[in-house]
Image (tube, rainbow, N blue to C red):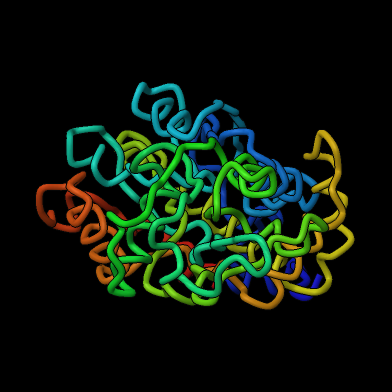
Amino acid sequence: MSHPFTRRRFLHNGGLLGAGLAISGFARASATPLRIVSNPGLENATLNALMERQDYFRRFGVEVQNIEVPGVSGPFDAIAAGDADACFVSGYNLVLPRIAQGSPLRIVGAGMRKVALVVFAKPGTMRGLADLEGRTVAVGPRLGLLHTLMLRLLAEKGLDASTVKFVDKGGNDQCYDAVVQGEADACCSSVSHLDDTKALVPLAGGRLWQQLPGCVFQTAYASTVAIAQKHESLVAAMAAHGALYEYLMSPDARDAFFEARRRASKKFDPASAQAVWDFNQTQRPYSRDLSMTASDLDYLQDMDVALGSLKHRLPIDDLADMRAATEAARRFG
C-alpha cells in the first residue's frame, strides 16, 4: 500500500495517540452493525470485494452488515423501508427527487465523483456529438442514469436532444452490444469498454468525465435515523471508504484490484478490468474526502429541475447532511 496504516500514524491522524485503543481508531459507536447496502453490479461487487480484502472496516473500527439488493433503485428502496442504513457505492439518479418527495434519507457524501461513461459508435460512422442528430442512441430506461446524463451532455453542448432517438436497451453492457449488433447507431456506456476488442470508438466530446466536470456521478446516502443514531459508525464507514478509494487509485493496488474483480465476475474479462484500472489510475475519479459542496449539490438539483424531476431547488439542509463526511475527512484525511 502507498499509505501504510501503522498504529502510530493511524492513532495520530485520529487525534487518539496514547488513548490505548486498538487499531480501529476509536471505540465501536453502536451496539448494532451499520447495515450497508449495494446492488450486485460488477463495479460495486469489485469495490466490496476489495474492501473485504483490505479489511478497512475493521481497521476503522466499524461493524457492518453488508446487504445486496438488485435493481438500480434497490438500495434506496431498502433504506427507505428501514431495511438498511446507508449506501456508498451504488449510483442512483433519482435520490434528490425522492428525498424531495419525502423519503427519509439524506445525501451524506460522494462515491465516484467523475462520470465514468463514454458515448461510443462504430468506427467511421460519425465523428462527434453533433452527428447524433437523426440517429438512434442506446441508453437505459427513460430518465434513468444513462438517459439523464446524455440529455445533460447535449444540453451543455447546445445540441437539440429532440433530434435524437433514444432507445432503452437495458444496462451499460446491453447498450454497448446493441451498437455492436447494429440495433443502434451509438450508445452511452461504461469506461470498461474502452479496451474492448469489439472496437467501438468514443465520439469526439463523448468522454463524459471531461464534458461534465461539475457532475458527481455517484452519491452516498443514508437514512435520517442512521444519521441521528449511528453517527460514529457513519464517520468510520466513510473513513474506510475514503481509504479504499485512495488505495484503489494507487499503483500498489493493481494485483488486489484484479483479484477482487475476478472474485466479483461471473466471467472475468481482462480487457474490461484493464480499462477500469487505467481509468482509475489516470483520471482518479474518487476522493478520500467524501464530502460534497453546496455547488456540487446545486449542480445535481439544476439537472433534475431541467428534466422536470424536481420542481425547483430546495435548501441544501433538506437534502443532504455532510457532518459525517466532514468529520471523517478531518479525523483521517
**Residue 230 x, y percent position in the rendering:** 41, 40
Residue 57 visible somewhere in the drawing: no
In this view, the residue in front, 41 or 158, is 158
Residue drawn 59% across the image and 61% down it: 120
23 and 250: which is toward the camera? 250
Q: Nearer the viewer, residue 216 or 170?
A: 170
Q: Is residue 104 left or right of residue 44?
A: left
**Residue at the image point whose x is 18% and y is 33% from the top:** 102
Image quadrant occupied by the C terminus:
bottom right
In this orientation, which residue lies closer to the viewer: 80 or 231?
80
| Residue 241 in the figure: left or right of residue 56 | left
Picture coordinates of residue 291 (x, y %)? 40, 64
How many marks do you count on the picture? 0
Q: Residue at x 60, y 28 (%)?
A: 68
Position of the N terminus by quadrant? bottom right
Report whether residue 103 is seen. yes
Task: Please provide percent x and percent y for residue 295.
Answer: 26, 71
The residue drawn where x is 63% and y is 53% is 60
Compared to residue 295, the image places residue 172 above or below, namely above
Location of residue 141 (image quadrant)? top left
The picture quadrant where one finds residue 279 is bottom right
**Could you say where residue 199 lies in the image, as x and y percent from the top left?**
76, 61
Image-quadrant location for residue 41: top right
User: Quick check: 9 above or below 67?
Assistant: below
Furthest residue in direction left, as rendered: 312
